Image: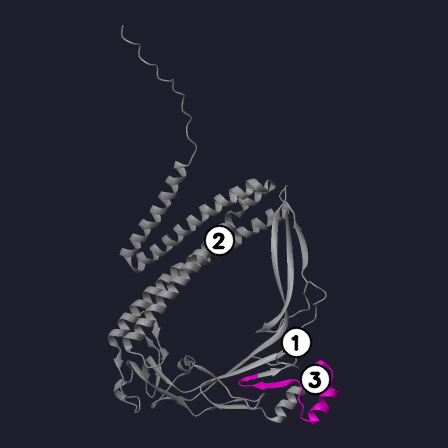
Amino acid sequence: MAVTEVTKTSYGQRVGSSFRGIGSGILLLIVGTVLLWWNEGRAVKTAKMLNRAEKVAVEMPDINTVNPEFDGKLVHASGMVATSDVLIDNLFGIQEKAIKLNRSVEYYQVQETSSSKTKDKLGGGQETVTTYDYKNGWSSSRINSSEFKDEKYRGSNFVLSDVENQDWLAENVTFGAYRLPSELIRSISGEKPVELSLSEDVIKSLNKTAAMVKKDTAVMLAQAALKDYKYVHVNGNVVYIGADSMNPQIGDVKITFTKVLPGDVSILAKVAGDTFTKHTDKNGKSLETLSMGVRAMDEMFSSERSSNKMWTWILRILGFFLVAGGLKGIFDILVTILKVIPFLANLVNLAVNLVLNVVAFAWTLIVIALAWLYYRPVLGILLLAIAAGALIFFANKGKAQGPQEPQAPQAPDTPAPAAE
């Protein structure tokens, strides 16, 4: 069942909030501008680093012996990773010879969601109606229900077992005769399910904890004596703590175990004795990467360039939205002042947002262009020309749509007199 909450904001409060928003807008504008500038430098430096790295990188065909000839060089190599480390989850008594062991926990909880509708009032005030809805579902984190708006659901969440997400990583992973550093070990992927077989002692302990939460310890002890475990269910790589895994209830916990086993990988890194480290370019950018499977050197460099381009565009878009948000925060006061007449304020808001989006787009292009003037002069000049063209086009369009001078009415044509 949904509940609603109505809040009212006076005209003075809205104006005061808009004034405070100017400071936040200026901060967002600065952050967005700095991000755009930094991102272009990062992208260019990374691209140059990859170009130079590809020219000096060498193939290391045999990883089964440590060859001093490759020491200090950037190499490409492919082969099998392996480990003798046994990773242990003491809580569940799980032991796996693996590169990674992961415990992922979900909790069945009451979840509160909200949606708001805001309406401007004549005179500049504002009314906001917020609707809170509730549903049961699995969550990756425990949800604090003590401040739920609906008293019916307040304090309803709990968990049958206080289990946390956790990862274990092997410390000793070999790559032929070489040792992999932790940075590359973390890059190894390919999760597979762990086949679980919990001991009776572990099950009893988990069952007892759940029963204490449920406050039916006496029943639990009687069932435990008969090995009729009430709350703990194991299915494949999942431990379910609850009365019925097919009918989840609030407080139930689901724990999933996965592992990463040895497999083929390909790396680009600098050899340092019997291990690897980062290859650092003269511009400060570094390269140390691992990909799953056997991949050629040019394929790995191509992947790194694609990743660089992807992040460049992601950060450009983020920078644009930060700039646009900053400009809106700065000039929002203009719209707020007109909120005494909501209809007029809405029209002005549309016009202001259109102008600010164009300015934000031009601002983004100008910052990128200035950065490229520093890093890539030819492309920088081209971008400045595009930004200037966008502003000129918008300005001319505004003039063309401006008020027209009234023209004097013209007299109707008088037919010429007929010749006698």
Residue position marked by numbered label 2 in the rendering: 326
Earlier residue among tags 1 and 3: 3
**Magenta region: which residues?**
209-238
Q: Examine the rendered structure and indicate whether residue 215 appears above or below residue 5.
A: below
Q: In which quarter of the image is residue 338?
A: top right
Q: Quadrant of the N terminus?
A: bottom right
Q: What residue type is labelled 2?
A: Gly
Q: Which residue does the image show at 72% across and 66% down from the upper left?
A: 152
Q: In which quarter of the image is the C terminus?
A: top left
Q: Which residue does the image show at 52% across and 51% down from the upper left?
A: 329
**In magenta segment, residue 229:** yes
- Let me know if residue 138 appears in the view: yes
Q: Which mark is residue 249?
A: 1
- Label 1 sits on a secondary structure element that is loop
Q: Which residue does the image show at 35% across and 63% down from the upper left?
A: 41
Q: Residue 211 carries which label?
A: 3
Q: What residue type is labelled 1?
A: Gln
Residue closer to the observer: 383 or 245 = 245
What x and y, as percent, mark residue 42? 36, 65
